[in-house]
Amino acid sequence: KAGVTQTPRYLIKTRGQQVTLSCSPISGHRSVSWYQQTPGQGLQFLFEYFSETQRNKGNFPGRFSGRQFSNSRSEMNVSTLELGDSALYLCASSNADRGGTEAFFGQGTRLTVV
Amino acid sequence: EDQVTQSPEALRLQEGESSSLNCSYTVSGLRGLFWYRQDPGKGPEFLFTLYSAGEEKEKERLKATLTKKESFLHITAPKPEDSATYLCAVQPRTGANSKLTFGKGITLSVRP
């Protein structure tokens, strides 16, 4: 059974640009969550999508947005990139209709903003 | 607001030297507490889920336990391949979402 797939693995962008990251969840999983990981803040929750609807959102500015498609694949977009957006972005999928089960993570996308 | 504190931040052990990693948490009703292992440059790998105080789970050299305020990850006779960052996360009972609140992690180094 294939795991969570994130593309691309690495990205280098310039300040002010925008970026789109992609996540394909484990087959059958309908919940997809996104996290930002930095050395100083650790793993922080960005948002969760379930059945194409955003179910929960963390404390990040509106420059961070996402969406989910009917096949449960999800994309995350960051507009007007800032140096502080450099981080490892992780996607996690679970088959939880109401939460309470484990989330499985992809390998992440390493974003560097220069 | 849910909070997770892990200690110590870093731990260096000799191969075979058993120890425990601590995860203290506050949450508005616990739905689940999760332990993950993360290797450098990779995503977190799921280890255990604990749901209620008194619960224990084991996997090879690892054993996770849960109380109402803490969880411990006990490592028995560790090997160098156990070197990694160990993350603890909680999921609240309220709401129908899957949000996890993570601790900063404990970096474990096991010397041969």
Image: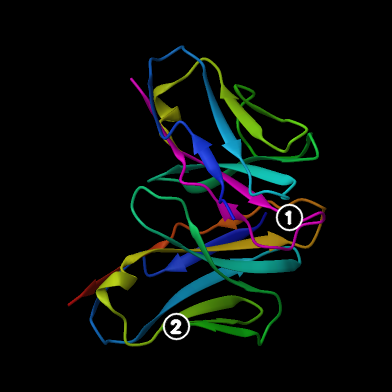
Q: Residue drawn 70% across and 75% down?
A: B51
On screen, residue B49 above or below A61: below
Type of amino acid under label 1? Asn
* Residue A90, x across and y down, in percent: 52, 43
Give, as a single range, the part of the protein colored magenta. Answer: A89-114
Q: What amino acid is at disc 2?
A: Glu
Q: Which mark is residue B78?
A: none
The residue under label 2 is B60
Left of B100 or right of it: where is A43? left
Q: Is residue A67 left or right of residue A46?
A: right
Name the residue: 50% across, 48% down. Answer: A43
Instruction: Tell me if residue B12 comes above or below residue B94 in the rendering.
Output: below
Which percent across, then down, holds residue B14? 21, 81
Which residue is situated farthest in the top direction here?
Answer: A16
Taking the view exactly as shown, the residue that stands out farthest to the front is: A1
> Label 1 belongs to which residue?
A95
